[in-house]
Amino acid sequence: MADARNFTVKKTSSLTDKAYCALKESICSISIEPGTLLSEGQIAKELGMSRTPVRESLKMLENEGLVEIRVGIGAFVKQISYKDLMDLYAVRKVMEVLAVRTSVDNIRKSDIRQLEEKFQALLEKHANDEEITVGEFINTDLSLHKLIIDKCDNQYIQNFMNTIFDNIKRVQTVSFEELDDIEESTKQHLELLDLIARRKKEELVIRLGEHIDWSMSCIRAY
């Protein structure tokens, strides 16, 4: 009996994870737009599962600030106001600048080379008028920032930043097609990588803060 119960718990957990990952990807990529009412029944039908794991996944997404559950009404994809945007980037700037003070000494040359190749590839595609998808650009953009967080010595910063990177991805995605900032953004990332490679910590701290301020000026609330 105990084994059967454990199997049921694991199966439910697995389905919850499946629903959570599917919804999170759709929300962060704006496949499901901000303000959309999320129907548990429809989602469950599309994913081939009952409503229970869907309901649990929505609670998880609410905890991460991606979904808003209104009692008696339902779950909605949370919108980001101008104040939310300002608060998000103010916290991001503080956390990343603090993180880079320790991560700069932990980032390997191979990590730097790998990212340099990705950003150079973006520049070449842009120069040749080749299509750059929103996912390609934003995933490359955030790869450097996530590396800075992953390599820092502060676990609290890592845990906190991992909860807000999804909202950062959302606001960048919604603004991607309106702004032609690929070249400038890529050059700034390459400059940051150069400073990391040369271990120019104080200059890196200043330029990273300026880059995040610039990034905030290039996006809009929705």
Image: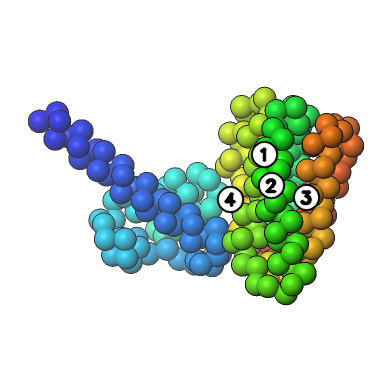
- The quadrant of the image that shows the C terminus is bottom right
Please report the residue visible at 58 percent of the width from the left and 34 percent of the height from the top. 159
Front in this rendered view, residue 142 or 122 = 122
At label 3, counting other C-alpha atoms closer than 10 Å, the crowd grade (few under 14, some 14-19, many 20 or more) is: many
Could you tell me the amino acid type at mark 3?
His
The secondary structure type at the circle numbered 1 is: helix
Could you tell me the amino acid type at mark 1?
Asp
Q: Is residue 82 visible?
A: no
Front in this rendered view, residue 82 or 212 = 212
**Residue that carries the numbered disc 3 in the rendered image:** 189
Mark 2 and 1 residues: CB-CB less than 8 Å, in contact? yes
Front in this rendered view, residue 36 or 117 = 117
Residues at marks 3 and 2, CA–CA distance in whole angstroms? 9 Å
Mark positioned earlier in the residue sequence (4 or 3): 4
Residue 180 in the image: above or below residue 27: below
Please identify the quarter of the rendering in which residue 162 is found: top right
At label 4, counting other C-alpha atoms closer than 10 Å, the crowd grade (few under 14, some 14-19, many 20 or more) is: some
Could you tell me the amino acid type at mark 2?
Leu
Residues at marks 4 and 3, CA–CA distance in whole angstroms? 20 Å
At label 1, counting other C-alpha atoms closer than 10 Å, the crowd grade (few under 14, some 14-19, many 20 or more) is: few
Residues at marks 2 and 4, CA–CA distance in whole angstroms? 20 Å
Marks 4, 3: nearer the viewer: 3
Please report the residue visible at 37 percent of the width from the left and 53 percent of the height from the top. 19
**Image location of residue 200, percent across then percent down:** 87, 33
